[in-house]
Image: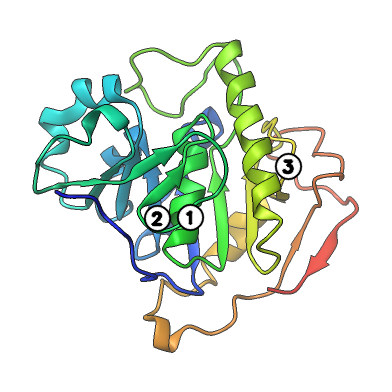
Amino acid sequence: MPSWTPSSEWKDQDVFIIGGGSSLKGFDFSILQGRNVIGCNDAWHLGVEVVKICLFGDASWWERNKQDLKHFPGRVVTCAPTLLPLQLSWLWQMERVRDGLHEGNVLGWNYSTGAAAINLAITLGAKRIFLLGYDLGPQNGKVHWHSYAFKPPNIEAFIRFSRGFSTLFQSLKRLPELEVINVTDGSSTLPMFDRLPMCEFLSIVKTLLPSPPPALAGPPPRLAVMSPASEPPTQPGHCQEQRREEITA
């Protein structure tokens, strides 16, 4: 497919992005059905009932997955530069710039698919973005919640990813109304973005309506999140009393 310029089809709505972190091992992905979900790389295996958009930016990942991926009924989007010449009706292509936040048919790569997915969610009109599985490091020796990855990232890759998120975070400061929330069980090493403990996310996500048409969208519910400066939970998965900052969506 020729270059894709997304419309604001998710304007003022919640968007959920599924990363690859092992903190999602055992996560009930069915609670995301009917919502605006971008799946990074191998998250497409969860099916279109959960993942509406599969985003990837690695040409080598494409080579390993293209035969199966063509059967995915959701939207398959790439910003891999070497794949731009391809003319496939089911492959939605966007331009890529290494750093920053961009508009139209351009995504800021910022060194990872997870960072590019945030840019895509913003282009689609997101009001609030929930990051799931953005661990940026191993947990109990495991890097991914799934077993599809061919070569898990090493420590140098995680350092590069973190540097990219830092660059993206600076660009996001020009969008003060946007909320990006890192949902974590305490294992995420991502040092920016407000944090919401996983157990609290699970307690409120079912109260959020499945993504409505833009004309019916009301203000997102009020959440209590921890600022990036707050101390993370001492035990992954443990909801404990700690300093919280009330935010109004």
Q: Quadrant of the C terminus?
A: bottom right
Q: Earlier in the sequence, mark 2 or mark 1?
A: 1
Q: CA distance from mark 1 to mark 3?
A: 17 Å
Q: Which residue is mark 3?
A: 192
Q: Residue 173, percent across and down?
A: 71, 56
| Mark 2 in CB contact with mark 1 (< 8 angstroms) | yes
Q: How packed is label 3: few (under 14 Cα within 10 Å), some, or many (20 or more)?
A: some
The residue located at (34%, 26%) in the rendering is 58
Disc 2, SS? strand
Q: How packed is label 2: few (under 14 Cα within 10 Å), some, or many (20 or more)?
A: many
Tag nearer the camera, 3 or 2: 3
Q: Which residue is mark 1?
A: 16
Q: Residue 47, percent across and down?
A: 25, 47
Q: Residue flagged by tag 1: what amino acid is it?
A: Phe
Instruction: Tell whether 181 sits left or right of 142.
Output: right
The residue located at (90%, 53%) in the rendering is 243
Q: Residue 143, percent across and down?
A: 51, 20
Q: Residue flagged by tag 3: what amino acid is it?
A: Met
Write down the quadrant of residue 134 in the picture. Answer: top right
Q: Residue furthest bottom?
A: 215
Residue 138 appears in the rendering: no
Q: Which residue is mark 2?
A: 37
Residue 118 appears in the rendering: yes
Q: How packed is label 1: few (under 14 Cα within 10 Å), some, or many (20 or more)?
A: many
The residue located at (13%, 47%) in the rendering is 90
Q: Residue flagged by tag 2: what amino acid is it?
A: Val
